Image (cartoon, grey):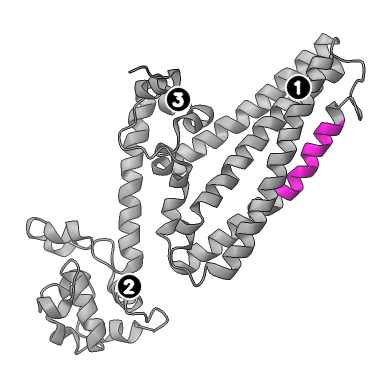
Amino acid sequence: ERKSCWSRLKACFARPGSMDSMDACWFSLMLEPTGSRSARVIMLGEAYALFGALFLSCTWILYEYGSAKAYGDAEGDARVGRVFEAVMALAIMCNTFLALNGMTLWVLSILQSESSQQWVFTVRGMLSLCLNLVTITVVLDFIGMVLAVYSNLSPRWPETIICFVVAAILHISWNRTLGDILVTSMPLEFYHTPLAHKLSTNPASVLTKKGRQKLQTDARARAEELKQRAYQRRGAIDPNQTQQAAFGDEGRQYPCVGIGSLLRGAASRLGKSEHDVTSYEARLAEDWIEEVSQLRGMSVDFLARYMPWALANEVHGSLMGGGSGEAQS
């Protein structure tokens, strides 16, 4: 079977388990608490809409500078002029639809993000589309900038070359800084993005063996961090830790979850996320029960001395690694 050049290139830099999708950028956001998740999606839509609207003026100024129909040199190379017109037409279209998609995401998120628990998952495609439109618009504007400089300054080559060099330095510096930030702050998400995105943003993480190994190691660490954070914020117990409890230190089985987090997570799963559970936590503290590990082995009826029975049953289920506490008591 014949393979395309792109398939062969991807095979050379195989990334085991990679999703190869820009949707991976948003999955960590799905693990955030509902309130934080809702606010961030709204802000993302607002940011894309405002950036698209404001950056459109920059795109238009660039078009005015390079077009022979405006400020550009009417006697310049006709072929360069046609390419410039096509590039800037595409940039204006992408920029306009970036603002439109951002506005749509902004409005819909205001209406739906609070009521829909799966809203980030629902709009992940639109979030990725906005991110791709930003990338495409920036690339097209950079190409248009180079063509505009060539059209207006050539054949004055010293000035033309200086402007080319400055433009290249600015673009490479921005792109390299962005790539370093992505690899450092979100290696797991970056690992699962498409190969083309990694090559354009941080090629060292793909082209060098050391870079690939470091990215994989950091991605695993990021995955573990997100998993523990998700259990902690939901007040749940990692079932892997529960299964390994007999082989570990009894006092360190639940290092990432406090009693307060455990109670709030259990209340949230019962639909009582707004209920204040600090009084139940205080009752446990009166009997010197201040660590989650101290609750292990307690029956539902014992826990019900400190809190409502339904909450005690849910807490017991969490401590036992999932399922109904009543069934396991």
The residue where tag 3 is placed is: 204
Name the N-terminal-most of marks 1 and 3.
1
Label at residue 272:
none
Q: Which amino acid does label 3 sit on?
A: Ala
Q: Tell whether 317 sits left or right of 172.
A: left
Q: What is the x, y in percent for residue 57?
A: 80, 43
Would residue 145 be counted in the magenta stretch? no
Report crowding for label 1: few under 14, some 14 to 19, many 20 or more residues within 10 A (C-alpha). some
Q: What is the x, y in percent for residue 293?
A: 17, 69
Q: Is the magenta stretch mostly helix, strand or loop?
A: helix
Instruction: Tell me the distance, in whole angstroms, between the alpha carbons under discs 1 and 3.
Output: 32 Å
Q: Tell whether 232 sits left or right of 48.
A: left
> What range of the chain is rendered magenta?
52-64
Name the N-terminal-most of marks 2 and 1.
1
Instruction: Tell me the distance, in whole angstroms, between the alpha carbons under discs 2 and 1.
Output: 58 Å
Label at residue 83:
1
* In this view, the mark in front (2 or 1): 1
Report crowding for label 3: few under 14, some 14 to 19, many 20 or more residues within 10 A (C-alpha). some
**Residue at image location 22% in from the left, 88% down from the top:** 309
* In this view, the mark in front (1 or 3): 1
Q: Quadrant of residue 261?
A: bottom left
Q: What is the x, y in percent for residue 119?
A: 48, 62
Q: What is the x, y in percent for residue 176?
A: 56, 30
Residue furthest to the front in view is 1
Q: Tell whether 173 sits left or right of 226.
A: right
Q: Quadrant of residue 139?
A: top right
Q: Which amino acid does label 1 sit on?
A: Val
Q: Which amino acid does label 2 sit on?
A: Gly
The residue where tag 2 is placed is: 265
Q: Quadrant of residue 71?
A: top right
Q: Determine the secondary structure under disc 2.
A: helix
Instruction: Tell me the distance, in whole angstroms, between the alpha carbons under discs 3 and 2.
Output: 41 Å
